[in-house]
Amino acid sequence: MNYFDQDLTSLHADLVAKKISAVALAKATFENLREIDPKLGAFLNLNEEAALKRAAEIDAKGINPDNIMAGIPVAVKDNIVTKGLTTTAASKMLEHFVPVYDATVVEKMAANDAVIIGKNNMDEFAMGGSTENSAFKVTRNPWDVSRVPGGSSGGSAVAVASGQVPVAFGSDTGGSIRQPSSFNGVVGMKPTYGRVSRWGLIAFASSLDQIGPMTRTVKDNAAALNMIAGYDQHDGTSSKREVPDFTAGLDGNIKGMKIGLPKEYMDEGIDPKVREVINNAVKKFEELGATVEEVSLPNSRYGVSAYYIIASSEASSNLQRFDGIRYGFRADDVKNLEDVYVRSRSEGFGDEVKRRIMLGTFSLSAGYYDAYFHKAGQVRTMIINDFNKVFEDYDMIMGPVAPTPAFKIGDEISDPITMYMNDVLTIPVNLAGLPGMSVPAGFADGLPVGLQLIGKAFDESTLYKAGYAFEQATDVHKQTPKVGGAN
Amino acid sequence: MAEERINADQVQHVAGLAKLEFTPNELETFTGQLEKIIGMFEELSKVDTTDVPATMRLSDDTLREATLREDKAVKSDDQLRRALLNNAPETANGLIKVPTIIDESGDGE
């Protein structure tokens, strides 16, 4: 079973009509995965025994006709903890870590009878934009296996793009859902900060992290966000706002919608072929009756610097918990307690994680705090104000997700700054806590290019409405990759 | 390039704060990379942030009210205790074991 021809609505209809059972669906998913995934490396760890048992329980009680997620196979990024199922965050530090509780989003999957198939590869602790920072394996882009899948939720994007699962859940701190979605031609939503509980998401940067769904279609994505959104008493930053039905209002009608296109998102730093895809998308939105006008986000250019100071500072603090004592990797032949800390951390963390810890510790250290950490927080305020100003006159902002399509494996990994600049268009959204979505918009030399839709806080609904109208007016989402898609 | 932004000694100092250690080769590579990244950060000094408050956390207006849950102890079972201890690198008698805290060689700090 691959998931190119059937969306959640059609799979759900088959499950309700008993044309297929949840067990048969899960078995077929693992069968296909075993054939496809050795070429791609999207999964770190499979949950086969438990998934089949769970599917049998779901069959036994019957598929709830009002629950579109019942019996649906889903994949989860490996920084989201799953009780009893090894969760590594793609780090040697957590190679043998077995969580004793489920993340809130995982509890919601279980409560909604979704079937967890396995855990996806990623950049270690979600730090990176190519999945090359995984301590365990290489993940390849199914459109061209010599290229990266993006990151850090690269495995999740590949699992969906190659038809291995219809839904995967990633996390996005600076673009980690949207950029791999763009690189793989799938729909990826980074919800508003506070929309989804972060309880059980292994913390990278707590003021920026959000969990979100990755799917083949916009409607499937809205259904998946319905499942995981909402207040959680375990996450004090989760919002008590009412969660709307995100699948409501997907009618293709966006007449009169006012959209801003930031000039900074279409400047010479963006690959001309990416700009062409975005310009064509703009034309399509205009044909659909929306107004698209140039706007400005003047401080977005400082986003990368502000982000790498803030995110690294928060990471340096969050990652102090890895000390080789209570869980995780402990170095051999240590002499004393200090040795346990230093050697376990030095041997357990990879280079990019160490770089971020060093940058964060430096930015927070005596004598540098004002010039770096505090200054970055001020620039963050200015970036938020830029968005607020645009949203006084516009319903939504759009532009590219990433400056280029997927690059070659090995091309950028040795140059941190080049790698960091991949996030230039996604970072401002995290700094402002806004919702952002990548929707497949076209191709550049056969590689997918995503269109980024950015909304007002807690207005994911407008992004879904616009994304759906655009998707239905194009055939981009019907294209399938070389590996898995067999075209 | 203007004044040196960060040198190997400072990197060594920061590594100490972060409980990390580097070989001489790694130290050289990291110093070079951090120098470049911190150089990039310096573009922020061009931004006039006079009287601009810093954003350190995001708060939805509904978040301004306390969303703290009641601080109530929840009893856990022995199974959970065992599962937790299974993740510890070294245990003894149902407790987490660590090496001697004071270096016995006598030259400790």
Image: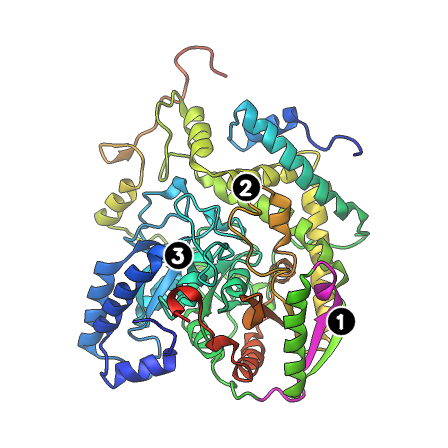
Q: Is residue A56 left or right of residue A300?
A: left
Amino acid type, mark 2: Ser
In the picture, the disc for residue A295 is: 1
Residue A356, given in percent of the width and then of the height, sits at 56, 42
Label 2 neighbour load within 10 Å: few <14, some 14-19, many 20+: many
Pair 1/3: label in front = 3
Disc 2 element: helix
**Residue located 55% across and 58% down the image:** A406
Q: Is residue A100 visible?
A: yes
The segment highlighted magenta reads A253-269
The verdict on residue B53 being magenta is no
Label 1 neighbour load within 10 Å: few <14, some 14-19, many 20+: some
Please state the chain letter of the residue tagged with numbered disc 2 in the rendered image.
A
Check disc 2 and report the residue beneath it. A316
Relative to residue A32, is residue A132 depicted above or below? Answer: above
Please state the chain letter of the residue tagged with numbered disc 3 in the rendered image.
A
Task: Please identify the quarter of the rendering in which residue A67 is found.
Answer: bottom left
Relative to residue A11, is residue B44 depicted above or below? Answer: above
Residue B68, given in percent of the width and then of the height, sits at 48, 59
Amino acid type, mark 3: Leu
In the picture, the disc for residue A40 is: 3
Looking at marks 3 and 2 on the same chain, the residue that comes earlier in the sequence is marked by 3
